[in-house]
Image: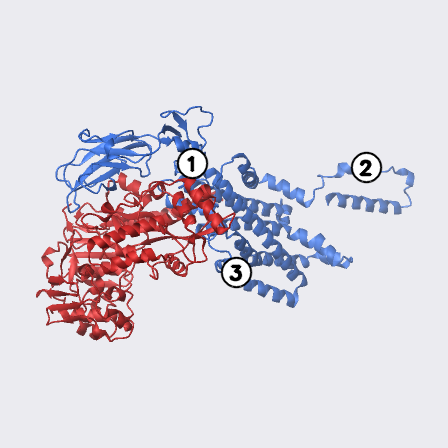
Chain colours: A red, B blue
Amino acid sequence: MLALALAAIILVTLLMFGLSLLSGSTKAKPGADFATKTITVTLTDEPPNLDSSLTADQISSFVLGHVMEGLLRLDENNQLAPGVAEKWEIRADGATFWLRPDARWSDGKPVTAHDFVFAWRKTVDPASASEYANIMNAIRNADDITAGKLPPEALGVQAVGDRMLKVQFAKPVPYFDRLMAFNVFFPIREDFYKATHGRYASGADMLLYNGPFKMVQWVHGAHIRFEKNPAYWDARRIAINVIDIPYFTSDPSARVNLFRDRRIAQAGLAQQNLEEAQLLGWNIRSFRDGGVFYVEFNHRRDRLSRNRNFRKAIQYALDSSVEVNKVIKQPGYLPGKSVFPIWLDGVNDKFRKEYPAPEYTPDTARARAYLARAKQELGLSKIPPIMLLAGDDPISGRVAEYYQDMLKRQLDLDVRIDSQIFKQRLAKMLAGDFDLVMAGWGPDYADPLTFGDLFLTGNVNNRGQYSNPAYDEQVRIAQNSNDRKVRMDAFGRMQQIIFDDAVVLPEYERALLFAVDPQISGVVRRVFGADPDFTYVKIAKE
Amino acid sequence: MTGTTQSVQSTLAAQTTLADPALQQGAFEPIRSELRVQALTRPSLSYWQDAWIRLKANKRASLSLWIIIGLLLFTALGPQVWRVNPAEQDLLQISSAPGAERSAILVAPHSPWAASDVPPGTAAGLQLVGRATTQQVRLAWQPIPGAADYMVYRNIVEPKGKATFGLPLGPTGSGDITRFEDMLDLQPGISFYSVVPLDAGGNQGPGSKTLRVEIVNAITLQQAADRRLLEGRKTPELGTMIKLPFHPLGTDYLGRDMLARLMQGAQVSLFIGIVAPLLFVLIGVVYGSMAGFIGGRADQIMMRFADFVVALPFLLFMILFKIAFGIGPGESGIFPLIVAMVILLWPGTARLVRGQILQVREEAYVNAARLLGARTGYLVMRHMIPNTMGVILVTLTFAIPSAIFTEAFLSFIGMGVAAPTASWGSMSNDGIKSMLTHPHELFFPALLISITVLAFNLLGDGLRDALDAKLRSRE
């Protein structure tokens, strides 16, 4: 028995030793190589779809942001900069873009206004069923085309010659220029698209590139390689030759291991990696991705959480500051105070400076008083167990357990935690199968409206189905006014209503931590568009 | 048995001698009973007594037996002795290792930091405002020329270069704000705080400052009162040292007592480990002995059905039962787990028992008993069951660790117990996330699973040796 165990241990040791020898013998490519101007990075998964007119997921927009370019783009400070268009003009009734003459596709032909018209019509065409067709609803007739009432040719966009693009609006859209950096508005060339016979974007040779890089290799599920695109009009700006992506892994610790071995230039860090990262002296950076996370109540008719006093009780029982500092413990997270995050612009300054979030201190006595009133109104002597829908990631699990204990201890509420994968959680949110849900929202554009209209009656993303005419009124003001002050006042009132009525309870504004190879600089993180953006990267000598 | 044979022989001898007419009755005197006793080579032992002696002689098995008894005591009596609520979270002692420092200084409750607390111009370089405690660390610094914003970093080692400042705690948001309050997961000990000026584009500028800060453990009056740490003190004064609650095995990621959770986990694990195998082994014994005893076509049909049950996937049925019983999310999956085990795991035992019965049925002594007119009931009770008992007990002891392991596995993947109830499997799952930083959160539940499974396996091994009649005759 003992001899057997000993033999087993020796065998395992030998095996591990042998494996490490094997892996050591293949020469590791460094994450950042100065000589060949190559950086190596990872993707969490295969890009689901690289047809720019149909896709909007994070991985696909990362790839498209490197190999394609829209009329405008975002620069290293996340400001709008000219892209294919060298000049543009936004009016109340429409917009005009003047295209630069030197913008070219990777096959050498110029990028023309027709390429944009073709791509945009394709997005709104009901036949292509693009998930992001609604982002075009600013353009005249877009809604009717998606609904099948008008042909795609009726879209309010036309090419005047090769180098001028005219857009007619359905309603005033002051942020229309910002949308142009979004991949749904990228160009697609009609003759190339038709020549692929339905196989467009299915491989590296089934795409045309007009961006800073071109994809030279795409082994599905395994390897993507970008090389500098010599046809790109601003190729001088690009300081690296190759972005190599030989690892597709959604496992964060696998990425940290690759970074530790210096095989990749950048890796996201989780809470458990932080101690090691400090001891090894890694260059740790943080980035707020713009998302706001909150506990959303179910306001449907048959739910307890429809009762305002019940919601207020929970509001006064939970403390977002303790949650962030003691339970989540991730640097960069900001305790939630409002659904409007701190980075949003107001009239002249940041929105949250001009319209501070309502301040309150969590207070057990007050929470209990609210709960007593709620019980009276509901006619219950004891609140039945409430269902908390949460994600299946470690942070959500911890926070859910923290809430469970807090609500039990302070309000004697029994909470059942329903941990679900993202897709299932979304389905349950849509079906209203929850009392409380840990939800979040990433902005679609840099205007408070992207958060404000979340609680508008009838919005699909209003998962709790909150409905309040006073709130809807403010959203309507914000949607239809062109006056910045009037709009911001409306958002300020929405912020107050969300607090007073305890529509949702803000939890935190998320931050992502990542470690970067000290040799490289200029990695740009973005709230909108391709994130991370490696087109500004420079590699220093070791 | 030895004793019986002896007496039969002597009776036979007496009969033969009586047949000889030359020998008279008076020439003999009766054998005294003591002499018969003397003739015994060793005391008569029942099957079980013998097995028990042999089990005790096996050191590994008897040690395992003691470990199992200890575990049962830990489970049954532990929570009576260590009366700590396993679900209670103490956010002041998150992930504290066994034997961590427990003394903390009493401080005033946290209040928002008003700008007036730092008189302008007094902050020379980078300095602390107030005392650095685990409640908060407040920093203020002289404005650095050209800064549009400041980034504040914290590190557990001294920064060596401009890329190694450590954890970015956050920007102050403006070049005018030259103070920062850190409340993030503060641990007692030395920390290095750095303030780095940022330009308008968010790039690091020159002129960063670093400060070495010693953070002390602290508790506010309110927190101390909530934890009933102030009882017996008349007027608790700020600045006095008090002891935080004691956690012999440390706490987990939400400050819950590990020992109390391990005890609660033991209840779940051992309950499943003992109840489920008892039930499915019982079903297997009944089914297997029926099949073996009846034999023929009925045996064929019954065993093919058992083969069919073996082919059913366990995990899938576990999920199906969970849904069929209407067990919603957030509720314990223990009941469907037991049902799935009972319904799906009996064929193993049934096969073993059937094989054993078939073998015993053909033995000469069974035939002899049958010829002597023994009835079926007698045959089963006297010959079949005792001769299969060894196999049954061994199956049972091996089924227990596998059931415990199944529960641990299912709780590990989130299908077993529901929070806040702990089981060893769910605790391992939670602990593995912080394996590198707080190994004790994984180590203790994993150790208990390993010890329990090993102990039951070794005991089963010992029982098999002890109950095997063939091994016994060879000695």
The quarter of the image holding the N terminus of chain B is top right
Q: Position of residue B15 (x, y in %)?
A: 85, 46
Q: Amino acid at mark 2?
A: Ser
**Residues at discs 3 and 1 in contact (Cβ within 8 Å):** no
Query: On the image, numbered disc 2 is attached to which residue?
Result: B33
Q: Residues within 10 Å of mark 2 (few under 14, many from 20)?
A: few
C-alpha gap between disc 2 and disc 3: 70 Å
Instruction: State the residue in front, B276 or B69.
Output: B276
Given the image, what chain letter belongs to the residue carrying mark 3?
Answer: B
Q: Quadrant of residue B136?
A: top left
In the picture, measured across the screen, residue B411 lies left or right of residue A459, that is right
Query: On the image, numbered disc 1 is attached to which residue?
Result: B250
Q: Residue at x 62, y 41 (%)?
A: B54
Q: Earlier in the sequence, mark 1 or mark 2?
A: 2
Secondary structure under tag 2 reads helix
C-alpha gap between disc 1 and disc 2: 68 Å
The quarter of the image holding the C terminus of chain B is top right
Given the image, what chain letter belongs to the residue carrying mark 2?
Answer: B
In the picture, measured across the screen, residue A536 lies left or right of residue A58, that is left
Query: On the image, numbered disc 3 is attached to which residue?
Result: B324
> Nearer the observer, disc 2 or disc 3?
3
Q: Quadrant of residue A106?
A: bottom left
| Same chain for the residues under marks 3 and 1 in the image | yes
Residue B272 seen by the camera:
yes
Q: Amino acid at mark 3?
A: Ala
**Residues at discs 2 and 3 in contact (Cβ within 8 Å):** no
C-alpha gap between disc 3 and disc 1: 39 Å
Residue A107 seen by the camera:
no
Q: Residue at x 23, y 39 (%)?
A: B152
Q: Amino acid at mark 1?
A: Gly
Instruction: State the residue in front, A487 or B77.
Output: A487
